[in-house]
């Protein structure tokens, strides 16, 4: 690509969203930013959009302004995918998360460019993409280990064998961090799906560009359709639906708006949802990853079975 | 009901000509009542705040009665918002000044001591539990009281070992815990709440249910005698409003509630935006599943224990029975025969299998559901056993021809009422069993190991009993999926509800 073209690609969009044509230059093919539901890339059913801008106010792209109906469709997709995904071998889930990291590694350049468009410096962008890849590898490794850390065999006093294991909560609706683009998204999604849940994620409203690129990465990583659903739009429009939907088992909110927190907690009571509030978490730091984020979206199941005690009092020979 | 209880019955046979269970000869069981002579009860109980029994600021008292005789036992103070505030202040003060700073090993010893003192007075507690709540003496003696003592003993030992429970973390206590407990296992629920809270370094304001406050107040006496620092545990009595005052108190850091899903939702909503940590242990509508390869006699015992234990006042009761079609007729016959042998009556009689329904209100709820079941077209069968003329009693009841959509198959009844459905395939029964907003417990009866694990992993429920039912242990976490609540009580997992991790 020549320098001039690269300059052009900093994107000067006219009001109708198209690049201004020049006389002898190749016209760049622009990307349509869609949403990701059930392994497909539809536009929002509402036909609405908003324009993502950078700090200088330059227009970056038209982004889908997802509706409540999009969210409901995504919940259906996530619920349908839950049975299969939660039944996958933990080892297999680990391989798939690792595969996401592989795919992301191969497309680093694209994400760096998008992050730069959204006001990151090149070094910040590089740091964010490598951290995101490493975080996926980190959670890939946890997929078949957290059960051993958080499960127990319980020494009950009666003649029973008794053990407790973590199992996925179900369908999780999460609002990703508004401040970070890619790392906020990855940090929210990875522990949810590592634990066998399926999810609907609302990407950062102000930095949405990476979200759809990441959906493409997921789509080419053997993640079954519906396991991860990514919407773009406004938290203010969707948070209450996230919290009140009766077929969602848990909601997570990565943000600091106390009114949103409170209202989500209130609405979640409708079907006793688990509510996870992650405020003031610096997702770029070490604190942005932990097996306890997986545990947050697990249920502990305890199983009992009698032990027959007949004869043979001691275990010795 | 752990043991098979025998009862003489006239020899007769079912309509299909199969002889009924016959427990030999013409012997009747002679009454075997537990003596009440050794129990010490006051005529009036005040609020236990800051280590002392104090009068309620309202000056109001309400009566607690024996549901088996409808006789008054004692009068109980009714706490209002001012009393709740006093209790919370006492708990906060004790937390900041004493309990938080105390070495964990010393904290542990107080909790161990409470456990020992309950064991020493176990018989008194068992009798009071049966008088106040209506549960059979066999149950309060063999299940409730020992488990309560054991729960304190188990959690005591955790106090100085908490960092081993949370790899990579240093857990810290929360502060003041507000705890609201139900009437079905009064002392045991108090133990489930208080023991982990104390072991993890929190202080407590606990409210027992209005129909069953006595053993919690007796526990307050033990706590006083144990020398536990004043204000570490406060026990206040009252109705739902008192509970709401606890939930809404701004200086409480944690709410733990066991009770109905309806009230649980109100509590979850009320604490929204408050930074209070909550755990909820709510209702259930458990499926108990019998496959055709199950040991049927054991399974029938398990079903009886599953639904009629504690008069069915159990959130994890196996209230929906699924029987594989090929064994349906035989299972139904065995069940009907078996419930004929159950003895309903005086909770203090050691022969009694099913005691008194906890309150008049609850008896009305159960009867309402029985008539709903009949109206919806299900077929009712009740034991023909006699029931006492006075007090609140309900015959063991089962319904057949139940549809998945019937209210008796969907809603929690909290009484001795079983809804029976049939199934053909594993897939079908998994689907039906999970088709409920609840997810507290489930039961599976089959002789095939691989089938057990298939079913136990697919049940969306927090406790799954395979070839057994209604077993509890301090080391075993208890709690639900979905609308049965969140958080666990018991075991290592019961610690995290009381800690910042």
Image (cartoon, rainbow, N blue to C red):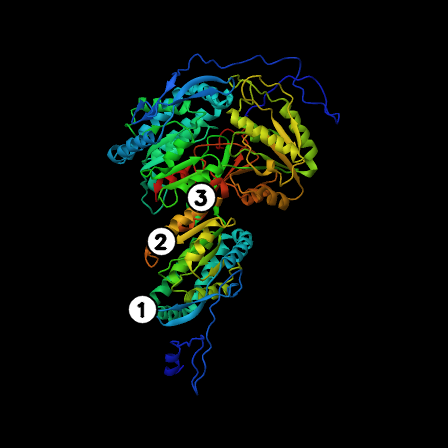
The reply to whether residue A213 is in sight is yes
Provide residue B71's location: percent of width, then percent of height: 48, 16
| Residue B246 pos. (x, y %) | 37, 34
Q: Secondary structure at mark 3?
A: loop
Instruction: In this rendered view, identify the residue nearer to me: B301 or B340.
Output: B340
Front tag of 1 and 3: 1
The residue to which callout 3 is attached is A151
Q: Which mark is residue A123?
A: 1
Crowd band around label 2 with a 10 angstrom C-alpha radius: few (<14), some (14–19), many (20+): few
Residue at which label 2 appears: A257
Give the answer, above or below, for where A108 lies relative to B194: below
Mark-to-mark CA distance, 3 and 2: 34 Å
**A23 left or right of B288 in image:** left
Look at the numbered discs 3 and 2 and tell me whether their residues touch, using CB distance below 8 Å. no
Residue shown at 61% from the left, 43% from the top: B432
3D distance between C-alphas at marks 1 and 2: 29 Å
């Amino acid at each position: 690509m020549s320098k001039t073209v690269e300059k052009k690609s900093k994107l000067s969009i006219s009001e109708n969203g198209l690049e201004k044509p020049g006389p002898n230059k190749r016209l760049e093919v622009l990307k349509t930013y869609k949403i990701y539901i059930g392994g497909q890339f539809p536009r929002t059913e509402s036909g609405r959009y908003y324009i993502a801008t950078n700090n200088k106010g330059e227009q970056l792209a038209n982004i889908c302004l997802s509706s409540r109906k999009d969210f409901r469709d995504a919940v259906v997709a996530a619920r349908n995918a839950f049975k299969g995904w939660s039944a996958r071998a933990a080892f297999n889930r680990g391989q798939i998360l690792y595969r996401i990291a592989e795919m992301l590694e191969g497309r680093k350049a694209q994400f760096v460019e998008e992050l730069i468009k959204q006001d990151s410096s090149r070094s910040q962008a590089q740091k964010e993409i490598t951290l995101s890849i490493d975080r996926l590898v980190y959670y890939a490794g946890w997929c078949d280990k957290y059960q051993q850390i958080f499960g127990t065999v319980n020494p009950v006093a009666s003649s029973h064998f008794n053990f407790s294991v973590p199992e996925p909560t179900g369908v999780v609706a999460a609002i990703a961090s508004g401040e970070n683009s890619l790392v906020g998204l990855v940090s929210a999604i990875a522990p949810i799906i590592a634990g066998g849940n399926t999810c609907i994620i609302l990407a950062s409203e102000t930095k949405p560009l990476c979200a759809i690129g990441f959906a493409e990465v997921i789509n080419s990583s053997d993640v079954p359709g519906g396991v991860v659903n990514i919407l773009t739009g406004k938290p203010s429009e969707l948070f209450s639906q996230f919290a009140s939907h009766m077929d969602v088992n848990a909601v997570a909110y990565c943000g600091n708006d106390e009114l949103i927190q409170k209202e989500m907690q209130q609405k979640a009571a409708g079907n006793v949802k688990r509510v996870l509030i992650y405020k003031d978490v610096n997702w770029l730091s070490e604190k942005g990853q932990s097996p306890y984020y997986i545990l947050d979206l697990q249920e502990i199941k305890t199983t009992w079975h009698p032990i027959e005690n007949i004869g043979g009092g001691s275990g010795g020979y | 009901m752990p043991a098979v209880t025998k009862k003489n019955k006239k020899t007769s046979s079912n309509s299909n000509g199969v002889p009924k269970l016959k427990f030999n000869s013409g012997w009747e069981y002679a009454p075997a009542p537990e003596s009440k002579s050794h129990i010490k009860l006051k005529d009036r109980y005040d609020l236990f705040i800051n280590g002392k029994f104090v009068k309620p600021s309202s000056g109001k008292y309400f009566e607690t009665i024996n549901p088996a005789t409808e006789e008054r036992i004692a009068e109980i103070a009714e706490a209002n918002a001012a009393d709740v505030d006093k209790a919370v202040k006492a708990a906060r003060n004790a937390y900041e000044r004493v309990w938080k700073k105390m070495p964990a090993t010393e904290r542990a010893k107080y909790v161990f001591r409470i456990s020992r003192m309950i064991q020493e007075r176990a018989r008194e507690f068992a009798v009071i539990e049966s008088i106040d709540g209506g549960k059979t003496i066999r149950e309060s003696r063999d299940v409730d009281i020992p488990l309560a003592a054991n729960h304190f003993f188990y959690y005591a030992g955790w106090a100085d070992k908490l960092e081993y429970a949370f790899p990579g973390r240093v857990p810290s206590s929360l502060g003041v815990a507000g705890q609201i407990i139900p009437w079905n296992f009064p002392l045991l629920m108090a133990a489930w709440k208080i023991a982990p809270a104390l072991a993890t370094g929190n202080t407590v304001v606990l409210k027992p249910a209005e129909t069953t406050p006595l053993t919690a107040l007796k526990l307050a006496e033990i706590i006083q005698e144990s020398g536990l620092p004043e204000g570490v545990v406060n026990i206040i009595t009252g109705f739902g409003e008192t509970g709401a005052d606890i939930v809404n108190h701004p200086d409480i850091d944690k709410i733990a509630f066991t009770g109905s899903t309806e009230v649980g939702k109100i509590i979850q909503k009320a604490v929204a935006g408050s930074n209070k940590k909550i755990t909820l242990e709510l209702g259930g509508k458990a499926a108990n599943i019998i496959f055709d390869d199950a040991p049927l006699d054991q399974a029938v015992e398990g079903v009886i224990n599953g639904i009629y234990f504690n008069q069915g006042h159990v959130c994890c009761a196996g209230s929906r029975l699924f029987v594989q079609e090929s064994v349906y007729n035989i299972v139904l016959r065995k069940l009907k025969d078996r419930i004929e042998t159950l003895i309903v009556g005086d909770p203090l009689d050691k022969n009694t299998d099913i005691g008194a329904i906890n309150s008049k209100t609850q008896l009305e709820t159960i009867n309402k559901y029985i008539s709903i079941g009949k109206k919806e077209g299900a077929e009712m069968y009740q034991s023909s056993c006699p029931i006492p003329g006075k007090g609140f009693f309900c015959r063991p009841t089962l319904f057949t021809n139940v549809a998945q959509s019937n209210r008796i198959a969907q809603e929690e009844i909290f009484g001795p009422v079983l809804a029976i459905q049939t199934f053909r395939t594993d897939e079908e029964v998994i689907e039906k069993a999970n088709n409920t907003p609840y997810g507290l417990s489930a039961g599976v009866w089959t002789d095939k190991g691989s089938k057990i694990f298939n079913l136990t992993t697919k049940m969306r429920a927090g406790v799954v009993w395979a070839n057994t039912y209604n077993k509890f242990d301090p080391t075993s976490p208890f709690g639900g999926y979905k609308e049965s609540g969140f958080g666990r009580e018991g075991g290592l997992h019961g610690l995290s509800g009381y800690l910042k991790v």
